[in-house]
């Protein structure tokens, strides 16, 4: 029973308790079916499972269980679709994150759920992740500038803590080789469905150049990969004058420039970004550069380098939205400005030509 496995870790983490953790034998005696209450919180993407909350010993302890089962496709198909394979892989990545990365991030003070237990079947088609319940409001949208800044502080802390993350460590940790759920390698259908005319047609031909530029960006770290408000947990009450936030859902955590997270956050989560975008970018930069400096990082990027990278990340996210559907803040004018720098306002006609233009104008 998951309750028996997780209870000792929950006890150890509960600083309010003065008594020592009970033994495994005592756990087996105390925990019975009547001691455990299960509540379904939501269904996961593609209908592959559910997220539950387990309440133990009349609510004294609570934790969250994400249980995923990847079933064979219906309708006689022998294999999952490309999109379902992407989602199935993402749940494995999240399990890897909680096993291999989350413990040392917690030691660095990054606010995330604490991993309690991870298990898989031999074929990695069944995944169970048990994690501590972070008390607060999950999602629901950001409401003010203070919450914008709190999210940016979290992102800056996460990015700086994982700055210059090495490829061999990334591979051994089992994370996404490229951060985000929309990057080009995993979205060929959306790329194919883009318009072939107008500025979207130009963006379509520039897509691989944009993807390559982000992959060779001098700034590299771990990115959350899905930094939207639904993956943020806000405290019900402030413990200080400064708002704090925790992030969850690390299915698309992987390597990339921090501007991948920043572009997505500013497009789909931040409030009043049309009026405060420059301020928020500068605030994030102050947080990031300050923390990198405190960590002894020598090659701290300039604000201009961050802004240039952000423009490319805006283009990358727009490429996905052109093929999938638009939402969030309208950033088309930013994309067009980048395309104009690449092609002078006239379609260059080939992906290779845009690769050359990208190297010339953005390095």
Image (cartoon, rainbow, N blue to C red):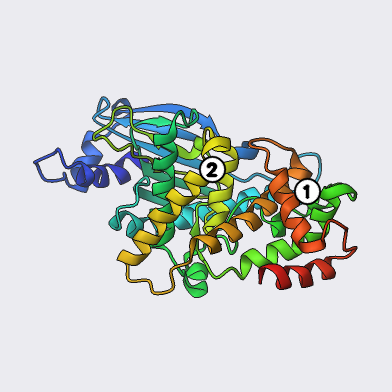
Who's the residue at 59% across and 60% down the image?
309
Q: Position of residue 135 (x, y in %)?
A: 33, 33
Who's the residue at 55% across and 36% down the image?
275
**Image position of 152 (left or right of 93):** left
Residue 190 is marked as 1
Disc 2: CA contacts within 10 A as few (<14), some (14-19) or many (>=20): some
Q: In which quadrant is the N terminus drawn?
A: top left
Mark 2 to mark 1 CA distance (whole Å): 28 Å
Who's the residue at 50% across and 49% down the image?
281
Q: Position of residue 310 (x, y in %)?
A: 59, 55
Who's the residue at 27% across and 42% down the image?
7
Above or below, 98 against 46 in this view is below
Q: Position of residue 94 (x, y in %)?
A: 50, 52
Is 32 or 332 nearer to us in this picture? 332
The residue wearing badge 2 is: 277
Asked whether residue 185 is in view, the answer is yes
Disc 1: CA contacts within 10 A as few (<14), some (14-19) or many (>=20): some
């Amino acid at each position: 029973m998951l309750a028996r496995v997780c209870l000792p870790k929950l006890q150890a983490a509960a600083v309010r308790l003065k008594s020592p953790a009970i033994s495994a034998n005592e756990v087996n005696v105390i925990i019975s079916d009547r001691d455990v209450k299960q509540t379904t919180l939501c269904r996961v993407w593609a209908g592959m499972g559910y997220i539950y909350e387990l309440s133990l010993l009349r609510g004294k302890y609570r934790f969250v269980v994400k249980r995923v089962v990847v079933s064979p496709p219906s309708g006689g198909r022998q294999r999952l679709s490309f999109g379902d394979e992407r989602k199935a892989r993402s749940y494995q990545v999240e399990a890897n994150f909680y096993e291999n990365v989350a413990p040392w991030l917690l030691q660095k003070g990054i606010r995330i759920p604490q991993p309690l237990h991870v298990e898989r079947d031999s074929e990695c088609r069944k995944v169970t992740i048990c994690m501590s319940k972070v008390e607060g409001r999950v999602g629901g949208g950001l409401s003010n500038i203070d919450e914008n800044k709190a999210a940016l502080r979290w992102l800056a802390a996460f990015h700086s803590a994982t700055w210059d993350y090495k490829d061999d460590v990334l591979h051994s940790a089992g994370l996404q080789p490229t951060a985000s759920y929309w990057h080009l390698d995993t979205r060929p259908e959306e790329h194919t469905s883009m318009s072939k005319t107008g500025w979207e047609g130009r963006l379509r031909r520039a897509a691989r150049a944009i993807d390559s530029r982000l992959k060779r960006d001098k700034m590299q770290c771990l990115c959350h990969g899905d930094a939207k408000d639904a993956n943020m947990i806000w405290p019900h009450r402030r413990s200080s004058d400064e708002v704090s936030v925790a992030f969850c859902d690390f299915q698309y955590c992987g390597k990339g420039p921090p501007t991948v997270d920043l572009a997505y956050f500013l497009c789909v989560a931040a409030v009043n970004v049309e009026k405060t975008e420059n301020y928020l970018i500068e605030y994030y930069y102050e947080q990031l550069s300050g923390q990198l400096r405190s960590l002894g990082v020598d090659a701290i990027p300039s604000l201009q380098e961050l802004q240039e990278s952000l423009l490319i990340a805006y283009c990358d996210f727009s490429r996905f939205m052109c093929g999938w559907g638009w939402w969030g803040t309208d950033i088309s004018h930013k994309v067009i400005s980048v395309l104009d720098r690449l092609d002078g306002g006239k379609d260059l006609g080939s992906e290779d030509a845009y690769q050359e233009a990208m190297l010339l104008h953005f390095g």
